[in-house]
Image (cartoon, rainbow, N blue to C red):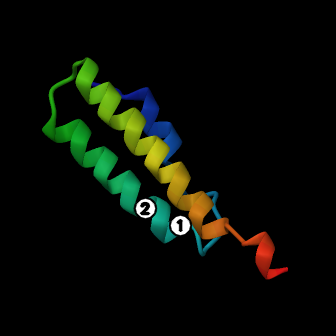
Amino acid sequence: MDEPILQFFEFAHLRQDLKPISALFAELADDLVVLLPYNPQRTVALQKLLEAKDAAIRAKLYHDPMDE
């Protein structure tokens, strides 16, 4: 079954320093699609994983304004 949310886990377009972080989440997302049956809770799991991936990328990009 095709899982449209997986498009948001693609990372080839990202900067080199962000790719390894995003790749971890993409791999887990792919695994979840294989391991879990298609149902609303799998969708929730993938949505929350996407939120976590986005937060991890922002954490990498973060610069503390107090350091400026």
Question: Can I make out residue 12 in this image?
Answer: no
Foreground of the two, 48 or 35: 48
Identify the residue at horizontal 44%, vertical 32% (top origin). Answer: 5
Residue 12 figure quarter: bottom right
Q: Is residue 59 above or below residue 16?
A: above
**Mark 2 crowdedness (10 Å alpha carbons): few <14, some 14-19, many ≥20:** some
Identify the residue at horizontal 54%, vertical 50% (top origin). Answer: 54
Is the C terminus in the top left, top right, bottom left or bottom right quadrant?
Answer: bottom right
Q: Is residue 67 left or right of residue 17?
A: right
Foreground of the two, 50 or 10: 50
Figure disc tally: 2
Q: Which residue is the site of mark 2?
A: 23
Identify the residue at horizontal 78%, vertical 75% (top origin). Answer: 66
Query: Mark 1 falls on what kind of element?
Result: helix
Residues at circles 2 and 1 in contact by the CB criterion of under 8 Å: yes
Q: Is residue 25 left or right of residue 9?
A: left
Q: Position of residue 20 (x, y in %)?
A: 47, 70
Q: Which residue is the site of mark 1?
A: 19
Q: Which mark is residue 40?
A: none
Q: Is residue 55 above or below residue 67?
A: above
Q: Position of residue 30 (x, y in %)?
A: 30, 46
Q: Position of residue 1 (x, y in %)?
A: 27, 24
Query: Mark 2 falls on what kind of element?
Result: helix
Question: Can I make out residue 45 in this image?
Answer: yes
Quote the CA–CA distance across marks 2 and 1.
Answer: 6 Å
Foreground of the two, 64 or 58: 64
Q: Is residue 67 above or below residue 6?
A: below
Three-letter amino acid code at the position of disc 1: Lys
Identify the residue at horizontal 59%, vertical 75% (top origin). Answer: 17
